[in-house]
């Protein structure tokens, strides 16, 4: 009888140990969404809310999924009628045609090297070239964020906070996130609030704060009119202004990065 009790106790201890080991393993294993949508190096995961990260992963999935985004090669769009951009995600090369002035830029946003043609003449002076390339880099950062922000919720330097549920200007219930930045981009002091529709999991509105300390935003814009381009969804409606001529190119248009 004593031997039987010892045997049963050993079995129970083994089962308990296995269960503890299994639970420990589960706690240290990334969730399915994290595996499917890993953060960029430098994303502030430790300082971000778990629920905010989960919602960011839901947004990526609703936009077409991480694989579709990674496989998207070349994106073209018109930024509020003032300029047209063509960005090769793979190489980093970007062409910017300014519509309100005679100027074209080709810049690699990874190296900040490139070429500028202004008033029909190639800029060769090093100081002038550096100035115009820096302008082009700032333009790309700004214009791409207006189009592609939902894909960049877990970018380098970003901290995500879950604010709670809120109602958008059109009366829909949404999750509300806060995005702040550290040592990244050209305006790290900015802050954004982003509303994610609870039914579609798509960004439906955002608010921009020029300074982190501000309580009232500089503006609030809708994110509507989603359409499928290639394998991803993109929105062009920002209320009073529109992002137009959106296109996805599987191959780089021939000669597009020549000036």
Image: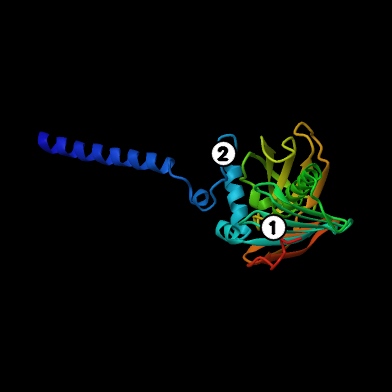
Locate residue 8, reporting x and y percent: 18, 39
Q: In which quarter of the view is residue 164 placed?
A: top right
Q: CA distance from mark 2 to mark 1?
A: 28 Å
Residue 181 or residue 1, whichever sits in front: 181
- Residue at 63% x, 67% y is 251
Q: Which mark sits nearer the N-terminus, 2 or 1? A: 2
Query: In what element is the residue under mark 1?
Result: strand
- Residue at 68% x, 65% y is 248
Q: Is residue 76 left or right of residue 161?
A: right
Locate residue 255, reporting x and y percent: 71, 66
Residue 173 or residue 147, whichever sits in front: 147
**Residue 216 in sight from this viewpoint:** yes
- Residue at 24% x, 39% y is 14
Mark 2 touches mark 1? (CB < 8 Å): no
Locate residue 227, reporting x and y percent: 71, 65
**Residue labelled with disc 2:** 45
**Residue labelled with disc 1:** 87
- Residue at 48% x, 51% y is 32
Q: Residues within 10 Å of mark 1 (few under 14, many from 20)?
A: many
Q: Residues within 10 Å of mark 2 (few under 14, many from 20)?
A: some
Q: In which quarter of the view is residue 79 placed?
A: bottom right
């Amino acid at each position: 009888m004593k031997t039987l009790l010892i045997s049963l106790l050993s079995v129970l201890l083994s089962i308990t140990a296995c269960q503890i080991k299994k639970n420990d393993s589960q706690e240290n294993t990334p969730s399915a969404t994290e595996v499917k949508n890993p953060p960029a190096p430098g994303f502030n995961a430790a300082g971000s809310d778990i629920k905010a990260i989960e919602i960011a992963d839901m947004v990526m999935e609703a936009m077409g999924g991480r694989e579709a985004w990674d496989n998207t090669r070349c994106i073209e769009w018109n930024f509020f009628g003032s300029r047209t951009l063509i960005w090769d995600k793979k190489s980093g090369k970007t062409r910017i045609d300014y519509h309100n002035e005679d100027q074209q830029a080709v810049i690699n946003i990874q190296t900040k090297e490139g070429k500028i043609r202004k008033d029909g003449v190639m800029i060769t002076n090093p100081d002038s070239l550096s100035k115009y390339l820096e302008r082009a880099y700032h333009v790309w950062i700004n214009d791409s964020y207006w189009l592609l922000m939902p894909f960049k919720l877990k970018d380098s330097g970003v901290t995500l906070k879950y604010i709670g549920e809120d109602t958008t200007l059109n009366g829909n219930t949404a999750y509300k996130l806060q995005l702040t930045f550290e040592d990244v981009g050209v305006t790290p002091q900015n802050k954004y609030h982003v509303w994610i529709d609870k039914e579609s999991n798509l960004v439906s509105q955002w608010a921009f704060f020029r300074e982190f300390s501000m309580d009232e935003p500089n503006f609030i814009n809708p994110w509507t009119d989603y359409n499928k381009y290639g394998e991803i969804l993109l929105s062009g409606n920002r209320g009073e202004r529109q992002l137009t001529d959106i296109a996805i190119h599987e191959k780089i248009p021939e000669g597009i990065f020549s000036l």
